[in-house]
Amino acid sequence: MSSEPAGTEAGTIPTWYIDPDAEDAMADGHAPIWRHLIGLIPERDLSAKAVLDYGCNQGGFLRHLHAVRPFRKALGIDIAEQSIARANALKGNLPVQYQPGSRLAGWDQEFDLAFSHEVIYLVPAIEEHAADIWQALKPGGVYYSVTGCHTDNPLWPKWRKLVAERTNTVVQDRSINDYAKAFAAAGFAVSARKLEFDGFIPYVPDGWMPDFADALDYYTSTKTVFRLVKT
Ligand SMILES: C[S@@+](CC[C@H](N)C(=O)[O-])C[C@H]1O[C@@H](n2cnc3c(N)ncnc32)[C@H](O)[C@@H]1O
């Protein structure tokens, strides 16, 4: 019998980036993308809604979401224990709970909306993940899952090497079609769109985007937003 509290599990990591400081920089870089994503979703009034952020890292997405579209309550879950501790330290009075782990046992039919931003390419068993999110959503619930880290990305061979070198996780090689197939098999009505980020993209020569032209294509064309409805 495990002595871990309910909802936690073995197999966590300390932080996602091996260098914990890189997680602050990641959050700064992702913030404009989170705001754009929030602007894309047709669900406007979240005041009565429960929201899940899967792979929340330091919790920044839910803080942004609550500032723009206040929700009733939310859960952020992530396999990185220290990142979750940071999320808890930063949450203030928000109606948010942050939990270490990757499985959603105990959260059956709890959420109206779920999000994951750049997480599904790290999940080892996508079928299990799809089934977990299905179970955690209420009937009619919607999962927005965003990734540009797929094998259709021309930068993928370079990026998969960088993720292996710089993070405590293992990347998975899946195409956009592989994701669509897996979520459809779990029962979701699957649709998707390009992220089509419409802001100015900063020039950040940090190894991920060696050619600035690639950055422009990545945020408009490569990065994909799945809309997965539990019918
Ligand atoms: C690229 S980061 C994205 C973080 C955050 N969603 C954002 O937009 O900044 C990927 C996150 O997914 C988490 N992660 C990776 N594999 C996971 C898993 N199997 N279960 C839960 N979280 C996972 C990592 O710890 C990391 O925080």
Image: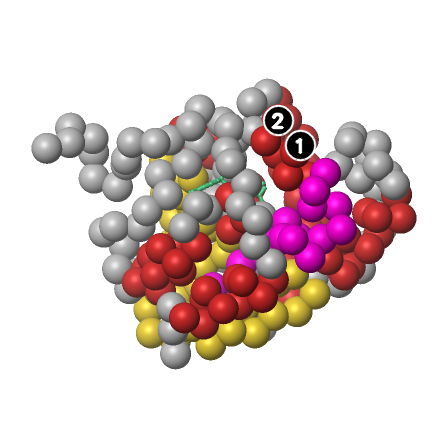
Q: Taking the image as drawn, is residue 105 in sight?
A: yes
User: What label sits on residue 165 in the rendered view?
Assistant: 2
In the picture of the structure, the residue carrying the numbered disc 1 is 162
Q: Is residue 227 left or right of residue 73?
A: right
User: What label sits on residue 181 in the rendered view?
Assistant: none
Which secondary structure, mark 1?
Answer: helix
The structure residue drawn at horizontal position 50% and vertical position 56%, both measured from the top left corner, is 115
Residue 219 placement: quadrant: bottom right
Mark 2 burial class by Cα count in 10 Å: few <14, some 14-19, many 20+: few
Q: Is residue 146 left or right of residue 195?
A: left
Dot 2 amino acid type: Glu
The structure residue drawn at horizontal position 21% and vertical position 39%, both measured from the top left corner, is 6
120 or 89, which is in the foreground? 120
Q: Is residue 186 left or right of residue 87?
A: left
Q: Is residue 16 above or below residue 55?
A: above
Which secondary structure, mark 2?
Answer: helix
129 or 105, which is in the foreground? 129
**Is residue 161 shown in magenta?**
no
Q: Is residue 12 above or below residue 63?
A: above
Which residues make up the magenta segment?
142-158
The structure residue drawn at horizontal position 70% and vertical position 61%, both measured from the top left corner, is 195
Q: Is mark 1 within 8 Å of ligand 1?
A: no
Q: Quadrant of the C terminus?
A: bottom left
Q: How far from the left and from the top, in percent, is residue 104? A: 31, 50
Q: How far from the left and from the top, in percent, is residue 61? A: 55, 47
94 or 176, which is in the foreground? 176
**Is residue 152 shown in magenta?**
yes
Q: Quadrant of the N terminus?
A: top left
Q: Taking the image as drawn, is residue 43 in sight?
A: no
Q: How far from the left and from the top, in percent, is residue 168? A: 51, 28
Instruction: Tell me whether circle 2 and circle 1 mark residues in contact (CB < 8 Å).
Output: yes
